[in-house]
Image (cartoon, grey):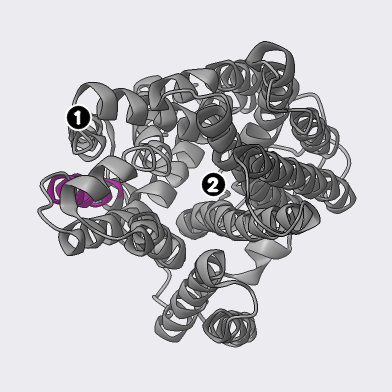
Amino acid sequence: MTDILARTDTADGVSDNPHHERRWLILVILGLAQLMVALDATVVNIALPTAQHDLGFSDGARQWIVTAYALAFGSLLLIGGRLSDLFGRKWTFIVGLFGFAVASAIGGAAVNFGMLVTARAVQGGFAALLAPAGLSLLTTTFTEAKERGKAFGIYGAIAGGGASLGLILGGFLTEYASWRWTMFVNLIFAGITIVGGFILLHHSREAVRPKLDIPGTVIVSAGLFALVYGFSHAQSAGWADSLTIAFLVIAAVLLAAFVVLQTRVANPLLPLRIILDRNRGGAFLAMFAAAAGMFGVFLFLTYYLQLILGYSALMTGVAFLPMTGTLIVTASVASAALAPKVSPRLMIPAGMILSAGGMALLTRIGLNTSYVSHVLPGTLLLGIGLGLVFAPAFSIATLGVRPEDSGVASAAVNTMQQVGGSIGTALLNTLAATAVAGFITSHGGQPASQLVNAGAQLHSYSVTFWVSAAVFAVGGVLVALILRPGVPSFEATDGPLVVA
């Protein structure tokens, strides 16, 4: 079977890839779509207090604005990826964009909590269509080794830096326009991308079209939903809560049943050959660990900047700019230059260890420390580390898959990132709450003074940064053990990736 990354040059030197001549313009629209999805993970967060005041919903309901998006996105990614394999990547991508835009418009016009949370859930569902379709289009458009490195460097930079850019955009729109524009802004991104998709993308179906695995779809969607919900519920109710335990147990049972089912059906939703390859498995683990650890930066460093240093929402977003800039430069330049020559077994773990070092540096923050001396060095190191992780991990995770599996392989790496982020957020929030309670208990048992409260918060931030550092470090070691030595060949077949 012809591999998805086989050369596209014919005997007369003319490419038979219909996207070849327009590949860099296609990268622009795919990058815009990925930026929109990445932004939406954080752009609404800063606007939540304002939206809560405007619509009059409770503190308990507020988390569901974020959770509804994560639940739909995380649980539907695999079926979204398989649909792009079935119906074609172009139309799955465009339908996902259109649905995302409509949901954003409804959310921006929301008149009550129910309307807003429903719009967020629908956004997540359509994001599960467009994200894997976009990555699959990138995989099939860039097939030459050097150009693929550049393209995935840019794409990885957007995926890694988009969340921090969302903080800036969310703060700017909330402060100078309205919280509703954190939703309406998606119409601009989606409009440009839809037009570009219609003009630039070519519709094609693979000669071999997999049938839809209905039982597998139902089981894995329910399992991922239970997993994400269980960890999200743990943030507010704790790990010992009966509902948290029930959902996590249900998730474990369903996901185990899904794995068994995939070995027995003729047309599996997620063929195990995709995830059992060592290089792809290592890339999936790297994305999971990086997403879990990275949320320690965005969540608790945001708290520190706003609650301790007194930054505004906009200035908090600006404070993340150096990390974002460093990540973009590292991913787009270093990855393009290193990926064709340096083994991912060296590059990705090195990025994970550098990220661990950045998190360790952030544990030095205090009540009177400055941004330049105690925050900036850690975030710059994080930017370098994450830039070395995201671009090569996205590339390796989709390298060498069969054409008819490219959508679901792209969905699998997105799923690992989404689930990693959900688990990381829940775990770190729980540890932070425990650290606050322990600090207060050790200082008299009552939050009697503002100084004690601030000290408790700082202690919780330090604990979460150390845990995030440990996640990065352990993840880096495991990834180094899993990945194969050598540079993966871009002439790989569907089996284990050949190394040069």
Instruction: Tell me if residue 150 is in the magenta stretch.
Output: no
Q: Mark yes or no: residue 409 visible.
A: yes
Q: Nearer the viewer, residue 402 or 179?
A: 179
Along the line of sight, which residue is nearer the eye, 102 or 297? 297
The quarter holding residue 202 reads top left
Identify the residue at image location x=22%, y=62%: 118
Foreground of the two, 367 or 153: 367
Q: Residue at x 17, y 33 (%)?
A: 191
Considering the numbered disc 1 on the image, is that residue within a helix, a strand or a loop?
A: helix
Q: Could you tell me if the residues under marks 1 and 2 are in contact, i.e. CB atoms within 8 Å?
A: no
- Residue 54, above or below 435: above
Residue that label 1 marks: 188
Q: Secondary structure of the magenta portion, mostly?
A: helix
User: Quick check: 372 above or below 35?
Assistant: above
Residue lying at 88% horizontally and 47% vertically, measured from the top left: 477
Which of label 1 and label 2 is nearer to you?
1
* 99 within the magenta span: yes
Q: Relative to 375, is 126 on the left or the right?
A: left
Considering every residue shown, the one lying at the far top of the view is: 372
Distance Cα–Cα, label 1 vs label 2: 32 Å
Q: Residue 354 at x, y = what percent?
A: 80, 30
Q: Residue at x 36, y 42 (%)?
A: 40
Q: Amino acid at mark 2?
A: Ile
Residue 415: percent from left, percent from top: 53, 58
Residue on which the image places disc 2: 4
**As rendered, which of 401 and 16 lies closer to the eye?**
401
Q: Is residue 339 left or right of residue 400?
A: right
Q: Residues within 10 Å of mark 2 (few under 14, many from 20)?
A: many
Q: Earlier in the sequence, mark 1 or mark 2?
A: 2
- Report the quarter where the C terminus lies: top right
The region drawn magenta spans 93-106
Looking at the image, residue 161 lies above or below residue 418: above
